[in-house]
């Protein structure tokens, strides 16, 4: 019951793994604080958590790409609660070949996946530094380790998240703050309704897709522990390790698989 009474702030909490992390944290005694753009969905999730686990659940409407909203929401939260854990989960992707990239769409991906994550982190980091405790968990992706065709911008955002996370981890360790990167492969969520409008990628990889409940459980398992990374699934993690050693070989061998988007 290490989470009992601990506030767990989750961005992108209205669906997918963000929603499942909220349920799992509440199940273990944590107090979820849900942040996302859809206030109606958040209200429904909060009600379900309160009814199922008899735990209060806070929620606020937030678009992480709006810096003013991030400032306002976190200023309100930090006047009333201690943020023990921040899960930066909000993010989206769009799969396109480079010649098809829409620059406004690419900017929005960076605004949400990278700058929004940094903005949320900055708001709680000073608070955690003062308390000399806390845990920041950034949901990155295996795409941050192995970039594949049609995911150039999305992979770039996740490479950026990993770079930021690795640097922050070293700085935060001086204040007793844990920092963890979570790198999942494809997950069965509505992420792909935007990322893969053709449905081809999901059709090709469906049998290997992770269940959001499984990913959420692994994320909650490591809360308030000095875990550097969570990599899922294991075989994809091993593939990324081998890729770091022999990139040309893996790109040659895996070319057909990589093109299945």
Image: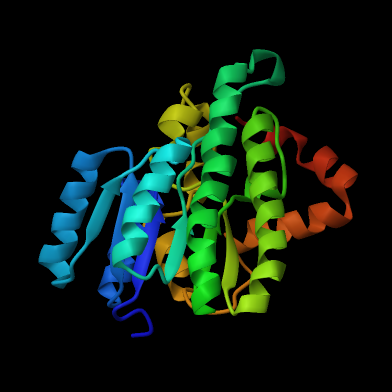
Q: Is residue 236 above or below residue 32?
A: above
145 vs 32, left or right, is: right
Tell which of 82 and 219 is nearer to you.
82
| Residue 132 horizontal/vertical position (percent) | 54, 79
What residue do we see at 55% from left, 34% from top? Answer: 111
Q: Position of residue 92 (x, y in %)?
A: 49, 37
67 lies above or below 129:
above
Describe residue 68's horizontal placement relative to residue 100 as left or right.
left
Quarter containing the C terminus: top right
Q: Residue at x 52, y 74 (%)?
A: 130
Q: Quadrant of the N terminus?
A: bottom left
Side (left or right) of 14 relative to 44: right
Q: Residue at x 72, y 60 (%)?
A: 167
Q: Is residue 133 visible?
A: no
Horizontal side of 96 relative to 216 (left or right) equals right
Render colour scheme: rainbow
Q: Nearer the viewer, residue 199 or 13?
A: 13
Residue at the bottom extreme, as displayed: 1
Q: Toward the viewer: 22 or 123?
A: 123
* Up-down relation of residue 130 to residue 159 (above or below): below
Query: Farthest left residue?
Result: 51
- How many numbered discs? 0
Q: Is residue 261 visible?
A: yes
Please provide percent x and percent y for residue 48.
Answer: 15, 58
| Rendered residue at 33%/58% (across/down) | 77
């Amino acid at each position: 019951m290490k989470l009992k009474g601990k506030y767990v702030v989750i961005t992108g909490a209205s669906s997918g793994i963000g929603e499942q992390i909220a349920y799992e944290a509440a199940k273990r005694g944590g107090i979820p604080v849900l942040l996302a753009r859809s206030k109606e969905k958040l209200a429904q999730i909060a009600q379900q958590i309160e009814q199922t686990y008899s735990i209060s659940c806070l929620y606020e409407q937030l678009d992480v790409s709006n810096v003013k909203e991030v400032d306002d929401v976190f200023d309100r939260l930090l006047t009333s609660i201690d943020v023990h854990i921040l899960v930066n989960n909000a993010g989206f992707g769009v799969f396109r070949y480079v010649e098809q990239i829409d620059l406004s769409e690419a900017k929005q991906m960076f605004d949400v996946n990278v700058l929004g994550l940094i903005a949320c982190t900055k708001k709680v980091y000073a608070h955690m530094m003062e308390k000399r405790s806390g845990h920041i968990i950034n949901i990155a992706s295996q795409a941050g380790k192995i970039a594949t065709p049609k995911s150039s911008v999305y992979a770039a955002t996740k490479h950026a998240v990993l770079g930021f996370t690795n640097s922050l981890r070293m700085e935060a360790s001086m204040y007793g703050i844990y920092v963890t990167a979570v790198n999942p492969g494809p997950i069965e969520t509505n992420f792909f309704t935007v990322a893969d409008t053709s449905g081809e990628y999901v059709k090709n990889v469906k049998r290997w897709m992770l269940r959001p409940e499984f990913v959420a459980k692994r994320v909650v398992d490591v809360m308030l522990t000095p875990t550097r990374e969570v990599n899922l699934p294991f075989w994809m993690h091993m593939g990324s390790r081998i890729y770091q050693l022999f990139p040309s070989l893996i790109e040659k061998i895996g070319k057909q698989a990589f093109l299945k988007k």
